[in-house]
Image: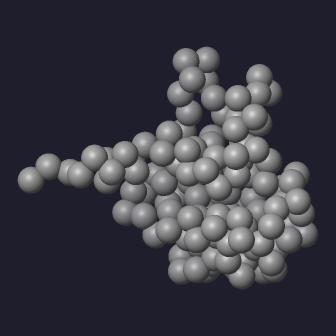
């Protein structure tokens, strides 16, 4: 039995980036910026790099986003934190949630997290 294409695709950092840009299209401009330190010269990047760069964007613009988009991000991050892909789940927790914990929007964003993501976030924002 072969893996379904979608399942294989979810293992790729590019898929993560596309999902983040799908929720926050404005992030595409930041991602393509020459100031993006997460993207290597050959264009490659890691889960952690994409999530850290997204984190900078999210912190800066959080108050501008409508609640439904923040809720969608919370659901997506929660799904990633439960992934069987250890590189993805670890990156979500250590390269995004850890950096968000304790920020001014801590309580509001936390409401949109579930499962492992919420537990991790609560531990770091305590």
Residue 4, can we see it?
yes
Front residue of this view, candidates 49 and 66:
66
Residue 119 position in % (x across, y down)? 61, 80
Q: Is residue 115 above or below residue 52?
A: below
Residue farthest to the left? 1
Total residue callouts: 0
Residue 50 position in % (x across, y down)? 62, 43
Is 80 on the left or on the right of 10, as rendered? right
At x 65%, y 55%, the residue is 23
Using the rendered view, name the quadrant where residue 117 is placed: bottom right
Residue 8 position in % (x across, y down)? 31, 47
Is 51 on the left or on the right of 70, as rendered? left
Is 61 on the left or on the right of 10, as rendered? right
Residue 115 position in % (x across, y down)? 53, 80
Q: Is residue 107 above or below residue 5?
A: below
At x 80%, y 67%, the residue is 66
At x 75%, y 58%, the residue is 99
């Amino acid at each position: 039995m072969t893996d379904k294409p979608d399942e294989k695709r979810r293992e790729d950092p590019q898929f993560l980036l596309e999902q983040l840009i799908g929720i926050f299209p404005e992030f595409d401009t930041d991602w393509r910026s020459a100031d993006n330190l997460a993207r290597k010269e050959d264009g490659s990047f890691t889960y952690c790099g994409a999530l850290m760069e997204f984190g900078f964007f999210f912190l800066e613009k959080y108050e501008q986003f409508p609640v439904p988009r923040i809720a969608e991000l919370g659901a997506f991050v929660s799904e990633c934190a439960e992934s069987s892909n250890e590189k993805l789940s670890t990156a979500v927790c250590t390269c995004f949630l850890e950096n968000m914990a304790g920020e001014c929007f801590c309580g509001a964003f936390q409401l949109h997290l579930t499962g492992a993501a919420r537990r991790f976030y609560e531990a770091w924002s305590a």
